[in-house]
Amino acid sequence: MNHHLDLRKKVIIMISVMASLFLVALDQTIISTALGKIVEDFNAFSALSWVVTAYLITTTITTPIAGKLSDMFGRRTLLLVGVTIFALGSLFSGLAGDINQLIIWRAVQGIGGGIITANAFTIIGDLFAARERGRWQGMIGAVFGVSSVVGPLLGGFLTESHSILGLTTDWRWTFYINVPIAIAAFIVIAIYCPTLKHENKPRVDYWGAALLALALATLVLAVDNTDRIFADLLTSTGMSLATLRVIMATIVVLATAAFIFVERRSKEPILDLAFFKNRNFLILSGIATFVGAAMIGSILYLTQFNQQVYGAGPTTSGLMLLPMIAGLMLVSITTGQLVSKYGKYKRFMVGGFIVAGLAIGSLVTLTPTSTYIHEAIIIFFVGAGIGAAMPLMNIAIQNEFEQKDLGVATSSSQLFRGLGSTIGVAVFGSMLTLGIGNNLGDMRQDAYIQTLKQSPAASQFIANPNDTNTLLSLNMPTTKQKINDGFTKSMTSVALPAPAKQQLQQDFMAKQNAYSTKLVNAFSKSLHTIFIITSTMMFTALVLVIALKERPLYAASPAETPGEI
């Protein structure tokens, strides 16, 4: 333990750690605004999924392994390695000359991101006694809240070409910006962060790491954009998507079975199977999985709702989530302080999940005619509930284990939450697609679709008029603007009187509005189902929290905390 460090050193260490974590959290939001421009510049729309999935795979694999390695080789060493890898991955992602290079360096970025994530949450347990961790977990929750706001804004600003010190920004700057922050964090960690090492003679479980990596990578590929990533394989072999997923599921099961076999015999297992004999660890892992899925099911689709219903662009739709972020940050920091003061965490988790479950359930009241104020009030309480409950999960799980096991225990929680998010994206995405399709029916004879087919400039947008993603993209503000500009331009070459042209323009807009109304209604109905399920998940997490056996959060003795009150 390093509770003996004075407060000044602890604060400096935590600032550097939070700066590192801010990089990772920022990258997840800033890249979303740049993806369209990236694939457009490289003319690689079919590879869009890989730009995101490559990072997700390596982060998922790295997080649990890095947690164990940090217990063995020290937090400082792993943090420095993670920050270095993330900085190099960011630099070379910005310098990528083609889409394949970008995908490779995004995967490298993910390795660094997984190492940082595993250690950032764990290091709190090394520096502070259990009762003091609440305020810092709350601060880390606020870091994620800030990144959620800053990311879309900064990403949009840099991608839209602005001049900074005589240099013109573009999407590459969304990667370059990570480098100076990473360098600063590296220097501070190298100077101030203690080793925080617990194993004297580390023995790396290579077989366990390899099998875990195989199982996790295959699982991510099986649920995340499988049809797009393996489109060429499916086409060339004639294999069905269902068959491919069965094969991949078999690989996951076999790799997991082999992993369990190896871990039972390993002297230093990557994930000690004895952890699963701990009742609270099992419960908290289940909570993390449900919360990961529920969060992605509410936050991700709220952004789409803002784009489809309110016609907001990517940056604006992100800004519209500010009330949620405000609720998350405010309550996260406040709850952390209260937990540190009273030494109790369960009551706050219970309250948080009640508020989050009710608020997410209230999202079903959102309709295409709802005002934004209606949404803003609800999502403030969604953020407040999540902000109260989510940071405390790490406190609870760290309180279950000895100091030497904090790395692997904390990273395991992050792993289950990440897997919940990954599986949630796939399941909810399929539900949304199916729901919209059922509500719309066959759209090939829709008047607006028929009109677009007749226009050479617009036909590119409807390669498959019954594909839900195609139908949704037609209603996106940027796509609608391109279609409208193309229609207006085509009218200039038509030899008709001005009144006739005006009538054609009005007819076209009427068809577009009718299509938009039909699509938005179908989208809203389908989204309500997702909100009901995510609300149910939050209440399931609540039941699991109630089943937790709360253990006391002990404060450090005066001798361990010089300079602190």
Image (cartoon, helix red, strand yellow):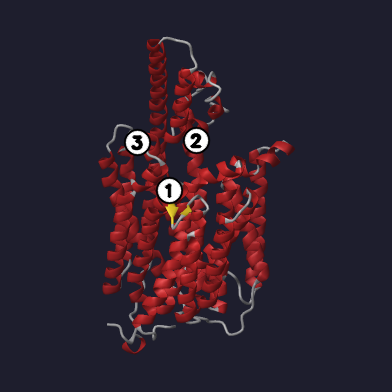
The N terminus lies in quadrant: bottom left
Residue drawn 42% across the image and 76% down it: 13
Whole-percent x, y for residue 248 in the image: 65, 49
Tags 3 and 2 touching, CB below 8 Å: no
Q: What residue is pinned by disc 3? A: 310
Nearer to the camera, 12 or 59? 12
Residue drawn 63% across the image and 77% down it: 267
In the image, is 503 to the left or to the right of 335?
A: right
**CA distance for labels 3 and 2:** 20 Å
Q: What residue is pinned by disc 2? A: 433
Nearer to the camera, 501 or 198? 501
The three-letter amino acid code for the residue at tag 3 is Tyr
Does residue 565 sit above or below 273 in this rendering?
Answer: below
Q: Earlier in the sequence, mark 1 or mark 3?
A: 1
Using the rendered view, name the quadrant where residue 363 is placed.
top left
Whole-percent x, y for residue 175 in the image: 51, 57
Q: Tell me the tag on residue 156.
A: 1
Mark 3 lies on a secondary structure that is loop
Using the rendered view, name the quadrant where residue 368 is placed.
top left
